[in-house]
C-alpha cells in the first residue's frame, strides 16, 4: 500500500500558558498542504519488520524513527505480521511542517489497512497522540483548530483559502521545539483564533500571529527576509509555520507564488495548491 504523508502549515499560533507538566497550552489552526513524502507498507517475505529510507537523510537510526515507533505501538495491542516499510523523504525536518508526525500517522493508517485491523479514526488518533502532539491531526488530515497541547481538535471551514496557492520555504536553519519555546512568553489574546480566521484574508497580516515568530525572527533574520520577499511578490498572508523554520506565503495565483519562489535561492521550497473544499 502506498500513501503520501503530507505537511501542514499553522494559521496563527497562540501560546496561552505553561502547564504544570512542563508542556504548553496552545491554540492554533493546522491546515494540510500537499508537500508530501512517499510511504509504502507491504507484508514482508522475511521474519522481521524493516524500514528503508531514501530522499532527505534523517539524523536518527531507523529504529528511532517515528514510523517504527508507530509500528511498535500497534504491535503492543495487535499481532502484526512482519512488514517492509519504505519511505521517500521529501518534506524537510526541523521546519514546523509536521513531516515526521505525518509519517507516523500515515503509518498507523497504512498498517491498519494492510493488516485489516479495523481500527477507527478516533482510536487511531488516540494512538497517534502517544507519538506526538501533531500526529493526531494527520489521522484526519483536514483543517482543524487545535487546542490543549495540540491534540484537542475541532474542524473548521476556511473558505478564504480555498483554491489558493501556497509557497513553503525551508531555509538552511534547524529550530528545535525547545529552542522555540525558550523565547516565548505565554499570554491569552483578546480574540480567539476562530474569530480572527473568520476575518477577510486581507486582514490576517495585522490580526493573525504566530507567537514563536517574534523571538525567532530576531535570532534568524532569514525569517523576516523570506516574508518580505513573499509580500513583495503579492502574498495575501505570510507567516512562520509552527515553531519554524519554514516560512509560507498564501497567494491568489500560481504565477505569483512561483515568482516569489524564483526570487529565493539556497532553500528547499515547494509550491502547492490548497484544496477547493476548505
Image (spheres, grey):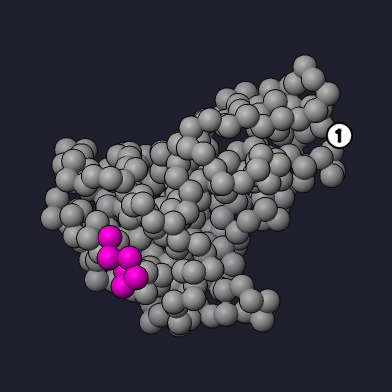
Place of residue 29 in the rendered image (x, y in percent of width and height, measured from the top left): 44, 60
Does the rendering let one see residue 10?
no
Position of residue 87 in the picture relative to residue 222 (left or right): right
**Residue at image mark 1:** 79
Position of residue 208 in the picture relative to residue 229 (left or right): right
Q: Relative to residue 43, is residue 257 depicted above or below?
A: below
- Confirm whether the magenta stretch covers residue 35: no
Magenta part of the chain: 217-222
Place of residue 248 in the rendered image (x, y in percent of width and height, measured from the top left): 31, 53
For the N terminus, give its image quadrant. top right
Which residue lies at the image location 71% right of the left edge and 30% below the top edge? 50
Q: Residues within 10 Å of mark 1 (few under 14, many from 20)?
A: few
Tell me where residue 191 sits by quadrant. bottom left
Camera-side residue of 228 and 51: 51
Count of numbered tags: 1
Tell me where residue 174 sits by quadrant. bottom left
Q: Relative to residue 116, is residue 186 depicted above or below?
A: below
Q: Relative to residue 59, is residue 229 depicted above or below?
A: below
Which residue lies at the image location 74% right of the left edge and 22% below the top edge? 43
Q: Secondary structure at mark 1?
A: loop
Does the rendering let one see residue 269?
yes
Could you tell me what secondary structure mostly forms the magenta stretch?
Answer: helix
Which residue lies at the image location 28% right of the left edge and 60% below the top edge? 222
- Confirm whether the magenta stretch covers residue 219: yes
Position of residue 27 in the picture relative to residue 65 (left or right): left
Place of residue 8 in the rendered image (x, y in percent of width and height, measured from the top left): 45, 49
Residue lying furthest top in this view?
Answer: 45
Amino acid at each position: 500500500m502506498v500513501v503520501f504523508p503530507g505537511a501542514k502549515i499553522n494559521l496563527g499560533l497562540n501560546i496561552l500558558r505553561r502547564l504544570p507538566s512542563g508542556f504548553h497550552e496552545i491554540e492554533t489552526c493546522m491546515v494540510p498542504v500537499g508537500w508530501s513524502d512517499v510511504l509504502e507498507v507491504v507484508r514482508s517475505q522475511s521474519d522481521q519488520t524493516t524500514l528503508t529510507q531514501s530522499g532527505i537523510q534523517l539524523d536518527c537510526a531507523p529504529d528511532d524513527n517515528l514510523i517504527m515507533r508507530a509500528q511498535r505501538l500497534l504491535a503492543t495491542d495487535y499481532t502484526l505480521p512482519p512488514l517492509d516499510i519504505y519511505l521517500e523523504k521529501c518534506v524537510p525536518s526541523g521546519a514546523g511542517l509536521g513531516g515526521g508526525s505525518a509519517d507516523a500517522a500515515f503509518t498507523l493508517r497504512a498498517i491498519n489497512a494492510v493488516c485489516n485491523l479495523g481500527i477507527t479514526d478516533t482510536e487511531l488518533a488516540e494512538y497517534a497522540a502517544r507519538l506526538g502532539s501533531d500526529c493526531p491531526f494527520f489521522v484526519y488530515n483536514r483543517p482543524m483548530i487545535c487546542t490543549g497541547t495540540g491534540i484537542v481538535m475541532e474542524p473548521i471551514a476556511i473558505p478564504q483559502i480555498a483554491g489558493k496557492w501556497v509557497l513553503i520555504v525551508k531555509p538552511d536553519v534547524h529550530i528545535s521545539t525547545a529552542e522555540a519555546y525558550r523565547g516565548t512568553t505565554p499570554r491569552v489574546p483578546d480574540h480567539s483564533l476562530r474569530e480572527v480566521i473568520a476575518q477577510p484574508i486581507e486582514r490576517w497580516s495585522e490580526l493573525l500571529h504566530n507567537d514563536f515568530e517574534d523571538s525567532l525572527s530576531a535570532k534568524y533574520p532569514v525569517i523576516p527576509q523570506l516574508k518580505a520577499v513573499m509580500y513583495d511578490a503579492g502574498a495575501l498572508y505570510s507567516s512562520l509555520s509552527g515553531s519554524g523554520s519554514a516560512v509560507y506565503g498564501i497567494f491568489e495565483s500560481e504565477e505569483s507564488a512561483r515568482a516569489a519562489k524564483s526570487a529565493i535561492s539556497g532553500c528547499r521550497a515547494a509550491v502547492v495548491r490548497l484544496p477547493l473544499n476548505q
